[in-house]
Image: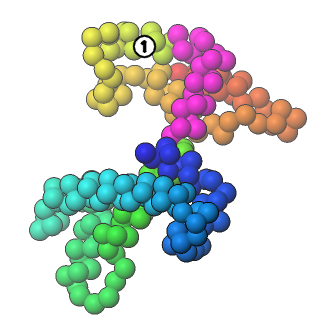
Amino acid sequence: MVDRQMVLFDHPTVKMMKSRFHFFGKLPYFKNFYNEVKYNRDELYKFYYKHVQEEKAKIDFSSSADPTNFCEAYLREIEKMNQQGGEHYFTEEQLIGVVSGMWMAGQETTTTTLVFAVLFMMLYPEVQKKIQEEIDRVIGSDRFITMEDKPSLHYISATCQLVSSTEGPKDPDTSEDPQKSFMDTLEIH
């Protein structure tokens, strides 16, 4: 659903519709497209709302503990503002809008980073081989990798860090070879 919404949001018609979204629902030519975009938007809103409510249910607002994530920090700020009274703009609807924007942005960034990582490993099968060797040595074949394994996965951690910080292919006439930089850095680890 998120993938479909990303495609829809990037469609030229939707970009045109953004300024007067509801108006386009009244035009016969746009009605079906409008309904699909609206349905997907509403389903995503329900998804985000459900997760915000689950997070809210876990919070002890009487505790002064530091928040463990963005959603908790925002919900604590809503609670604080509500207790102070007066007008403010910290609402659950605003939170859902912010979470939606972060999710969509993260979706695109994550996809691009993963594609870039796969391309690098296709260019450098020796990197892929070292990653597989580290997985076999540290994890084995009887379980999945977890976050608790990260401190033991030095080569994979270094590779992930490099892939996420590399800007991608560059013009060879104006910059040093990014693949060479990538491989030189991997050799250090």
Residue in the image at 39% along x and 14% along y: 135
Residue 162 coordinates in the image, percent (x, y): 57, 32
Q: Closer to the camera, 74 or 64?
A: 74
Instruction: Say if the magenta span includes residue 125.
Output: yes
Position of 144 compared to 129: left or right?
Answer: left
Instruction: Tell me which residue sits at (16%, 55%) in the image.
Output: 58
Q: Is residue 135 left or right of residue 170?
A: left
Magenta stretch: helix, strand or loop mostly = helix
Question: Residue at point 53% right, 49% down?
Answer: 6
Q: Is residue 79 left or right of residue 38?
A: left
Asked if residue 142 lies left or right of residue 34, the reply is: left
The residue drawn where x is 15% and y is 67% is 61
| Residue that label 1 marks | 134
Rendered view: 104 above or below 186: below
Instruction: Pick the quarter of the image with the N terminus.
Output: top left
Q: Amino acid at mark 1?
A: Glu
Q: Is residue 132 magenta?
A: no
Q: Is residue 107 visible?
A: no
Q: Is residue 140 above or below residue 18?
A: above
Looking at the image, which residue sits at the far right?
173
Judge whether residue 3 can be spotted in this image.
yes
Q: Which residues are magenta?
A: 110-129
Q: State the SS at label 1.
A: helix
